[in-house]
Amino acid sequence: MALKRPVESDRRKFWSPLRVVSTLVVMMLVAVFGISSCNSHDQPTTSTAPAAPNRAANSLPPNVLDAELKSANGNTLKLSDYSGKVLLVNLWATWCGPCRMEIPELVKLHQEFQGQGFEVVGLSTENPDTSAASVREFVRAFNMPYAVGWATTDVEMTLMGQNGNIPQSFLIARDGRVLKRFIGFSPDSTPLKLRQAVTDALKG
């Protein structure tokens, strides 16, 4: 998905005083606790609980793979379109501080490994009818080069199960198996674990 590079006015508009303050607060909490996450529908919260253990799981079910999801570029997308690729599905929200901290790392991963058959799809857990403008503004401000859209309630619940914290990512193998699940974001460990997992998946 080709997007124009954001101009400075876009960045100033997105980084309102409230967003700057909330991001600084989240960063301080992350520095203290090491890992942070938000509830997918409530206001941002922090968690000291470690991420759920990475474990192999079943393949993505058809209701997730074949769901037609609204895309930020005005079209629709389906996860099944990425069959044969190593895919990272990231669940996030514009107001979630840890998500904002993680996304630059996902941009780096996408840029580094896309040529090797790796893709990222970012699915916002927000209401697409009320968050369309903020999500598109976010995509521009963070210069996100990968596909971005919205998770339906069914897709979100199927993927997350009982743990609704975000950011939450699923690394999918070329054959559709769920290889890893990442919950929350730790600046000290998550980027390294993500990179290693993607590297291993591309070799598999």
Image (cartoon, helix red, strand yellow):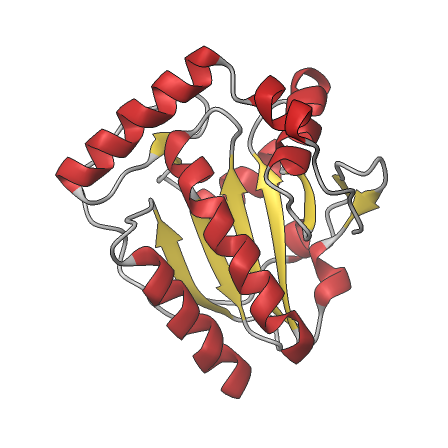
**Camera-side residue of 197 and 142:** 142
Taking the spot 37% from the left edge, 59% from the top edge, the residue there is: 191
**Camera-side residue of 94 and 3:** 3
Left or right: where does residue 104 sit relative to residue 81? left
Query: Could you tell me residue 101's position as x and y percent?
Result: 41, 41
Judge whether residue 11 can be spotted in this image: yes
Query: Could you tell me residue 175's position as x and y percent?
Result: 62, 77
Residue 145, compared with residue 24, is above or below; it is below
Of all residues shown, which one is farthest toward the front?
A: 8
Left or right: where does residue 35 sit relative to residue 64? left
Taking the spot 80% from the left edge, 50% from the top edge, the residue there is: 2
Of all residues shown, which one is farthest toward the left?
A: 32
Query: Could you tell me residue 55's position as x and y percent?
Result: 34, 67
**Camera-side residue of 153 and 13:** 13
Q: How many numbered circles does the render carry?
A: 0
Left or right: where does residue 87 sit relative to residue 18? right
Query: Could you tell me residue 65's position as x and y percent?
Result: 68, 56
